[in-house]
Image (cartoon, rainbow, N blue to C red):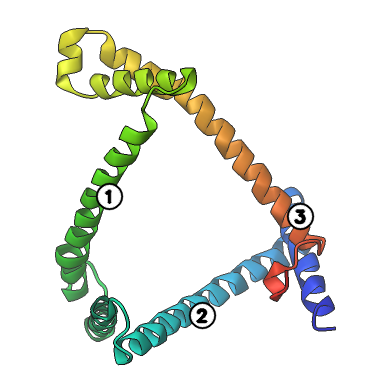
Amino acid sequence: MKNEVPIAIAFFTGMLMVASLFVPHPVIATPASVVRQWAIIITAFAYVLGVANIARISLHAVSKRQKDWQYKAALVASLIIMASIGIGFGIESGGTFDWAYLNMYVPMQATMFSLLAFYIASAAYRAFRARSPEATFLLVTAAIVMLGRVPVGEKIWSGLPSFTEWIMEVPNMAAKRGIMIGAALGAISTGLKMILGLERSYLGGD
């Protein structure tokens, strides 16, 4: 019964949510709305459990002086400070919490993304080697797009920015939409497998 009951709940809940997208009748729409509210509440509890789990693991690493325990100590300290500010002073715009977020978190986030740019440049250098016709095509296209995004590209050819926009909006968008369609079909397939009980990894099994 420990497997059958969760599978039955997943089946009826999933079918209810799918039916609510196609049948706008109150008999289906009302319970579907209630289920969505339950999902929001469960998600809130999941956030609390996630924060508690991160704090537990980090404090254990700090107490045992494991590798990079200093960073975990900074994580716990930041978590406590921001939570205390939010609970004590509120999170209204222009308040103490908002000031700490804009003047501490946002600059650190920008620093992290700026460091990530160097890794992206390194990966691009390795990927853009013309070892095959496909890699050569990728290299030429990337060079055109990069030149079209900077002022020197317009100096080379006045129509280069427009050609770059065409590359981004037509061939690139077509490939992007193909990837998105494939991802959506994969998500639908996984959802159907969970609803029908074919996918049981959420139960803790294989």
42 with respect to 151 (left or right): right
Disc 2 residue type (three-letter): Phe
Q: Residue at x 67, y 43 (%)?
A: 185
**Other residues around mark 1 within 10 Å, as few (<14) / some (14–19) / many (≥20):** few
**Other residues around mark 3 within 10 Å, as few (<14) / some (14–19) / many (≥20):** some
Determine which quarter of the picture holds residue 146. top left
5 with respect to 82 (left or right): right
Alpha-carbon span between mark 3 and mark 1: 37 Å
Q: Which residue is identified by label 3?
A: 192
- In this orientation, which residue lies closer to the viewer: 43 or 130? 130
- For residue 81, the mark is none
Residue 19, given in percent of the width and then of the height, sits at 77, 55
Q: Residue at x 28, y 76 (%)?
A: 68
Q: Is residue 86 above or below residue 162?
A: below
The first of marks 2 and 1 along the sequence is 2
Give SS at disc 2: helix
Give SS at disc 3: helix
Residue 80, given in percent of the width and then of the height, sits at 27, 84
Disc 1 residue type (three-letter): Leu
